[in-house]
Image: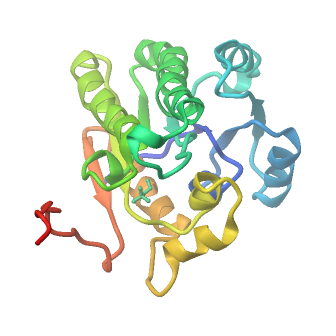
Amino acid sequence: MQKYQPKTVLITGSTSGFGKAFAQRFAEIGCSLILHGRNAEKIQELINALPNVPKHAMIADLLKPQEITDAFNAIPPSFHNIDLLINNAGGALGLDKFHEMNLADADAMIDSNCRSLVHITRLVMPQMAARKRGHVINIASVAGNWPYPGGNVYAACKAFARQLTLATRCDLQGTNIRMTSIEPGIAETEFSVKRFKGDADKAAKVYADTQPLTSEDVGEAVFWVATLPEHVNVNSMEVVPTKQTWAPFAIERDAG
Ligand code: 8X3
């Protein structure tokens, strides 16, 4: 089968977890990388650790739309022809019941998972359409497909990412642009430490006594999707550990 190789890849949230694995995987095949993150030092560390391919640090706080635009406009011309955008940044804050949760956390999740996704994609996509070449991969989650207690706003944000992917595909007729929603299940990354605001013990319990996905597992899934021949589009792909399935419905019963 004739395989496809992106030449320039932009990865948001590249300095940890899945983002790092994507950077490593695409560097291995010689892609030029635009590595987005909030922290310049962390991006530099990543740049130093990766194979020797062209790299550009894109520093922006995703909660600040103007920073996203400014950082996008500062991308050097040699990186302008972005073939693959991986919208990976975002994450969860808290696991509280909806009626008890912190509204500032909800706003931050909506901004980092949804608004920034729209803004970055809107900035990157015109050159893909003009060149009739490109692929946008949105990192959604099983949380967007299957409800679980305390998932509320995070789950809704991930459902947004998935549906934005599918709905946007309707607009991409004639552009040759591919678009994919990847929906990972439980994966051992910094995700839960962030969700529990630095409580490493609480985060570790999420992954205890089971075999979650690794960042590399998800990296391999994304790599496969991104290197399929250009006439093949994976709309959505759910990837979970073998040990993760579903619980029965919760039925509230009267006492007594
Ligand atoms: C992360 C997966 O199941 O922890 O998106 O919500 S889960």
Residue ID at (64%, 42%): 13
- The quadrant holding residue 140 is top left
Across and down, in percent, residue 116 comes to 55, 25
Is 129 left or right of 8, judged from the image as shown? left
Q: How many marks?
A: 0
Nearer to me, 148 or 184: 148
Across and down, in percent, residue 243 comes to 32, 80
Q: Quadrant of the C terminus?
A: bottom left
Q: Residue furthest front?
A: 256
Residue ID at (11%, 63%): 254
Across and down, in percent, residue 156 comes to 35, 37
Is 143 left or right of 83, judged from the image as shown? left
Across and down, in percent, residue 246 comes to 21, 68
Q: Is residue 139 visible?
A: no
Residue ID at (44%, 82%): 211
Q: Residue furthest bottom?
A: 209
Q: Is residue 82 visible?
A: yes
Position above or below: 103 against 241: above
Q: Quadrant of the N terminus?
A: bottom left
- The quadrant holding residue 133 is top left
